């Protein structure tokens, strides 16, 4: 019996998803988040916003994988995400074509359509929007091309494998860490908190918000006084945090749901003259998700209290390995 390699990929992917069920589930969802690099290092920004191609020689019969990434630009987390896929593709002799969705759902869907026309064997993607990505999955499946997701997923059961970490649990843990830090400062978990908010159109970002809020609700004397939604650029996050400080700087803690907002917090604090280390009067307890070199330096220097990170270099690897 002859088995098409696309059907083989789909079958292996479905089998692999069972092995990973303990670390990712529909309850924990995507990691839209953004992060794993360092905003100061241009080499980690993922390169240009044009479609780029990474081709490796795997001999006759090697698979051609399309990687429709959420966006590159200046996002170091996505740059590291892409590098992980490229390293593994080269190691395994896969042909890999990477497209840059520019954090625009319509652009990402068009990128996926081009990959289908290139007759790829499978598509790996980190959807910008969970609902909109259903179209991407359906159109690829119509051509018998399986779609795997990593970091964020599509709102459909037709994805045979999804790899991410538990975003809701991570956000809930961030709330607990923040409460502990506030208790160390004041003798009890109390204070006024500002939350930076990612756009609530992707399951990952919703979970990073809801997990944090539900965690904070366990503490009667902690109040979230403001939620600052930003457009996933470090500049906008810094501007939103600076504006909050200018309007009302009487808050004790800041929650940053991804790498870019965490990096933005440090620059905003410095610009507004409130960047104080832990233990100093005026220190703003800062806890976030995702980390990179600058975040780690800020933690070492006691400016950033804690970050919960994830192994994004392995996300594309886990999905490709089952192709």
Image (tube, helix red, strand yellow):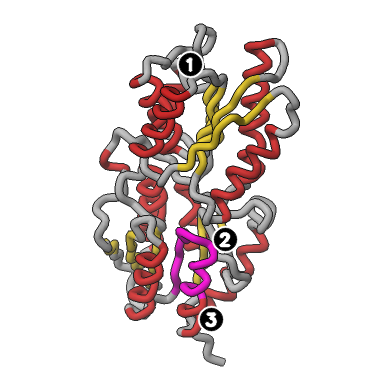
**Residue visible at 37% across and 53% down in the picture:** 82
Viewer-nearest of discs 2 and 3: 2
Is residue 130 highlighted in magenta? yes
Answer yes or no: is residue 4 visible: yes
In front of the other: 284 or 313:
284
**Residue visible at 30% across and 33% down in the picture:** 40
Residue on which disc 2 sits: 162
**Residue visible at 59% across and 73% down in the picture:** 158
**Residue visible at 37% across and 39% down in the picture:** 236
In front of the other: 75 or 285:
285
**Dot 1 surroundings within 10 Å: few (below 14), some, or many (20 or more)?**
some
Label whose residue precedes the other's in the sequence (1 or 3): 3
Circle 2/circle 3 CB separation < 8 Å: no
Q: Quadrant of residue 105?
A: bottom left
Residue on which disc 1 sits: 302
Magenta residue span: 122-137
**Dot 3 surroundings within 10 Å: few (below 14), some, or many (20 or more)?**
some
Residue 61, placed above or below residue 280: below
In front of the other: 20 or 142:
142
Furthest residue to the front? 247
């Amino acid at each position: 019996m002859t088995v098409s390699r696309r059907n083989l990929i789909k079958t292996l992917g479905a089998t692999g998803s069972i092995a990973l069920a303990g670390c990712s589930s529909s309850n924990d969802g995507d990691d839209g988040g953004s992060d794993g690099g360092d905003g100061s290092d241009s080499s980690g920004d993922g390169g240009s916003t044009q479609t780029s191609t990474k081709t490796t020689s795997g001999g006759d019969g090697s698979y051609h994988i399309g990687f429709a990434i959420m966006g590159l630009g200046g996002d170091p987390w996505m740059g590291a995400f892409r590098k992980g896929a490229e390293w593994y593709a080269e190691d395994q002799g896969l042909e890999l074509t990477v497209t840059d969705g520019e954090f625009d759902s319509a652009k990402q869907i068009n990128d996926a359509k081009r990959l289908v026309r290139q007759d790829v064997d499978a598509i790996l993607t980190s959807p910008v929007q969970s609902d909109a990505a259903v179209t991407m999955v359906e159109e690829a499946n119509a051509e018998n091309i399986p779609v795997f997701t990593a970091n964020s997923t599509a709102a459909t059961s037709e994805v045979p494998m999804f790899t991410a970490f538990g975003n809701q649990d991570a956000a809930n843990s961030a709330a607990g860490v923040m409460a502990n830090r506030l208790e160390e400062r004041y003798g009890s978990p109390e204070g006024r908190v500002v939350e930076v908010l990612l756009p609530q159109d992707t399951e990952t970002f919703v979970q990073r918000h809801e997990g944090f809020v539900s965690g904070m609700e366990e503490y009667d004397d902690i109040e979230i006084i403001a939620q600052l939604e930003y457009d996933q650029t470090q500049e906008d996050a810094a501007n939103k945090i600076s504006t909050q400080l200018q309007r009302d700087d009487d808050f004790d803690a800041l929650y940053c749901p991804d790498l870019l907002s965490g990096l933005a917090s440090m620059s905003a604090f410095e610009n507004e003259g409130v960047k104080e280390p832990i233990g100093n009067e005026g220190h703003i307890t800062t806890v976030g998700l995702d980390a990179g070199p600058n975040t780690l330096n800020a933690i070492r220097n006691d400016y950033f209290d804690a970050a919960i990170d994830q192994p994004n270099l392995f996300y594309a690897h886990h999905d490709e390995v089952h192709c």
